Amino acid sequence: MIVNVFDYVEKLENSGFSKNQAEASLQVLMDIMNQEFATKHDLKEAVNELRQELVKTETGLRLEISEVRTDIKLLRQEMYALGDKLTIRIGAIVTAGLALSLTIIQLMK
């Protein structure tokens, strides 16, 4: 923000401020601006900090995604193994049921 100090002081004086009051008001305004406004350097530092934070976050997310993918692969392997066991058990149950049925039919004759 650029302040034309001469116009500022002149407008205050035209509004009834004494020259000392106008200059004091200008000094207060300048002090506030110096304390509260970010400089280009401040903004560049903030941008650099944000970039570094983004890189850290991205790295962390990539690691977590990799871990999740590994977990998914392991779960798939476990599911296939359980599916195979279930198929074998169902086959055994069907075979036992068929043998029992045939035995019952033989005994009924």
Image (cartoon, rainbow, N blue to C red):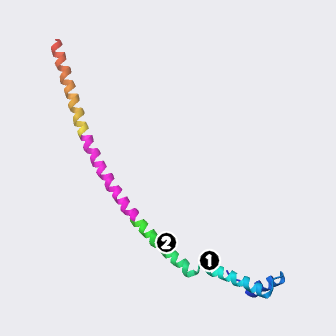
Q: Nearer the viewer, residue 24 or 6?
A: 24
Q: Amino acid at mark 2?
A: Leu
Q: Nearer the viewer, residue 90 or 67?
A: 67
Q: Residues within 10 Å of mark 2 (few under 14, many from 20)?
A: few
Which label sits in the foreground, 1 or 2? 1
Q: Which residue is mark 1?
A: 36
On the image, the x and y values in percent for residue 55 come to 43, 70
Of mark 1 and mark 2, the one earlier in the sequence is: 1
Residue 37, located in which quarter of the rendered image? bottom right
Amino acid carrying mark 1 in the image: Glu
- Compared to residue 64, the image places residue 90 above or below, namely above
Q: Does residue 2 appear in this view?
A: no
Q: Is residue 69 visible?
A: yes
Mark 2 element type: helix
9 sits left or right of 62 in the view: right
**Mark 1 falls on what kind of element?**
helix
Assign the N terminus to one quadrant of the image.
bottom right
For residue 50, above or below residue 99: below
The quadrant in which residue 31 appears is: bottom right
Measured as percent of width and height from the top left, residue 42 is found at: 55, 79
Task: Name which quarter of the figure residue 61 lies in.
Answer: bottom left
Q: Which residue is mark 2?
A: 50
**Which residue lies at the image location 27% right of the left edge and 48% below the top edge?**
77
In reply to whether residue 34 is colored magenta, the answer given is no
Disc on res. 9: none
Please tell me whether the stretch drawn in magenta is mainly helix, strand or loop.
helix
The magenta span reads: 60-84
